[in-house]
Image (cartoon, grey):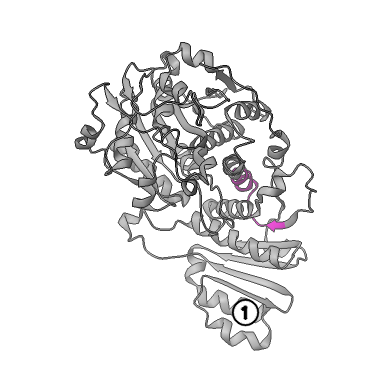
Amino acid sequence: MKKNVKKTAPKTKKSFSTILEPHIAYSLVSNFNKLSECDAIIYYFGGKEAKNKQKNLEALVETHALDFQVDELKKSDKKNIHFIGRNGPVWIVFESTGAATDHDGLLNESAYAFARDQFGTILGQIKALKLKNVSIYFQTADAAVTEGAVVGLELASYNFLTHFKASAEKAEPLKIQLNIKNENLESALKKVVAVQIARHLTNLPPNVINPATVEQLVYDLPFSKNTEIIVWDEKKCEAEGMGLLCATGAGSPTAPRMIRFKYRPGKAKNKKPIAFVGKGITFDTGGLDIKPSSAMRLMKKDMGGAASVLALAFWADSSGYDRPCDFYLALAENAVDGFSMRPGDVYKSRAGFLVEIDNTDAEGRLVLSDVMDVAAKQTGSDEPEYLIDIATLTGAIKVALGGDTAGLFCNDDKMAHSFMTAGQRSGEPNWRMPLNQRLWGDLSSQFADFKNSGGGFGGAITAALFLQKFTNGKKWAHLDVYSWTDKSTGALNAGAATGQPVQSVVEWLESL
């Protein structure tokens, strides 16, 4: 392989130091009577109090509204009611109390998701009104609601340029008082920091983020002694027989690599580790099967899976998660030059399979498969019980399910159901797709054991079937995600990286 040319890029450390801190100054109060004077107040009613909507609404309207507003506000049937009354802005939010009737409730909005998106939306209004001090009063709200509210506020407060500009001045933070328990706040902030890490890493431009600078960033993040960081450079990957990973990155001046976070908590449960593998194509031109410019425009997001896995590693470490885990990043840049892999090339994978390159733009499964083989074949105390890969793998899954719902492929029914229920609770849905073995014939090859892509139908399924060959019989889940939003929605108030599926995977881990 050619000698790699070193590129210089802006440092990422300063950009990420602010991501690790809350954007809002929180203070906790024990009850409503101790709330100090503020610019605005938000009331949230959950549980039985949400069912008493009319009674609670009338009482608050009488207290806060101006005379001409009273009658109209009392008639409102909205879940989120906003007005500027006698003493300033007021929001009254009523939790949804509808029955779970949609697909056994698996696609219903959870209380966590409702609170997250309602408070994320409200934060945009708070910013527009230039408020400095806001009080939030939760009436009959459980931990999922209060965590969702804080996550929504923090997600909506994220601004890429604020963190990216080295010269950006630190603004005075918004002050928010909450009548919640401290542990709810701490849990929410640890979760949202992980999501913000995934969002920001995916948003960074491709002249800043490549396999080498991801490695630099990893060492800049404050991991504890419970996490060992292991990096396999290009030479180690070649020595390990990772022909598919190395071929994918051959056209780039920045060599591919694999990064492993070996998390072993001091007081770990006596269980096997959980292994995660993230697709980290830091930029995807499509290779010699080059993408059209419109399709290439957002291909910095092709590392969304690796960004999420890195974020999950940080969450496990910072929260003291009680199970051992391994987090792997499969990193490469799919670029174009004379060393790029070609359609018709045949490469040997670490697992020993010969793979014919049918399409150089089906590269994500190549880098994942070699690293999945590393993860799946760990032995002794490092042998994983579960293997999960996360990848922005196919456009076909977005066509089928939309950008908000991840495609879930899984070889274990119990595991699949637990992922789907975790997705519903976290407001980050995934939907199980079939591992239809009859489509495997689309990947048949005369010149290798199989090809890396097939025909025009069932593209997300054939990609999953390819990956299944590298699971070594482990309980396995594959999440085919978009990790991006093209519009402002809920707590995600700007069209950019979403951090999908960090929230749902955290929920799944906490449920084990």
Residue extending furthest front? 338
Residue extending furthest left? 438
Asked where in the image residue 20 lies, by quadrant, the reply is top right
- Locate the C terminus by quadrant: top left
**Camera-side residue: 220 or 168?**
168
Q: Is residue 141 visible?
A: no
- Residue drawn where x is 36% and y is 42% of the image: 408
Q: Which residues are magenta?
A: 176-189
393 sits left or right of 214 in the view:
left
**Camera-side residue: 510 or 347?**
347
- Residue drawn where x is 40% and y is 53% of the image: 402
Q: Residue 138: x and y, percent?
A: 60, 61
- Residue drawn where x is 39% and y is 42% of the image: 394
- For label 1, the residue is 61
Q: Residue 500: x and y, percent?
A: 49, 45
**Camera-side residue: 137 or 220?**
220
In the image, residue 200 above or below residue 314: below
Q: Is 188 in the magenta?
A: yes
Q: Residue 387: x and y, percent?
A: 39, 29
In the image, residue 95 above or below residue 421: below
The residue type indicated by label 1 comes to Val
